[in-house]
Image (cartoon, rainbow, N blue to C red):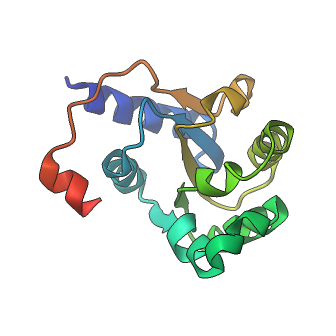
Amino acid sequence: MTALDEALEQLDALVSRNGGSGCFFVLMPEYRPDLSKLFAHRLGLRMFDYRAIVMASYGADANRIPLHDLTDRLQQETVDEGILAHNVEALLATKTEPERQRWLSEVMSAAWSNPMLIPLTLFTRDAPAESGRVLDLREVTFEDQGLISRLLH
């Protein structure tokens, strides 16, 4: 069994243990959009790239987006289906550590009508690990992402 197969099984188990809904964090060893897409596919989640869909239209002013706007948008996106909220860290990077930690705890404990998976690479230490909704893959060595995959993702 490969590291990816084991990670996918752990992800399935995590979501199942928690009733199949709510917010989940996956702590990643590196930025890997290809793995995020595989996680989304495995769980039947729609990929939602916050940076591309929301932040890009703000340009240089994207850092002014308040975190409650991020929460509101994610709530809207999860009304009818589950999502993998990709590139959320792009906005989190513009906030202070206490703001990030507060947001991560709030979003974890909020009521979500469908599952939402948020991969974290930069701010893994800020994730509320005690929640039982965090999959820590930081020490996992995944197969290298090939050149074609890097160009496509």
* Frontmost residue, 5 versus 30: 30
Quadrant of the image containing the C terminus: bottom left
- Residue visible at 52% across and 37% down? 121
Can you say whether 71 is above or below 116 in the image? below
Quadrant that contains the N terminus: top left
* Nearer to the camera, 143 or 4: 143
- The reply to whether residue 79 is in sight is no
Name the quadrant containing residue 74: bottom right
Residue 73 locus on image (x, y percent): 71, 71
In the image, taking residue 50 as reference, residue 5 lies left or right, namely left
Can the viewer see residue 109? yes
- The percent coordinates of residue 125 (x first, y second) are 66, 26
Q: Nearer the viewer, residue 80 or 98?
A: 98
Identity of the residue drawn at 36% across and 21% down: 140
Indicate the position of residue 48 as horizontal and vertical percent values. 51, 66
Residue 43 as seen in the image, left or right of residue 79: left
Q: Quadrant of residue 143?
A: top left
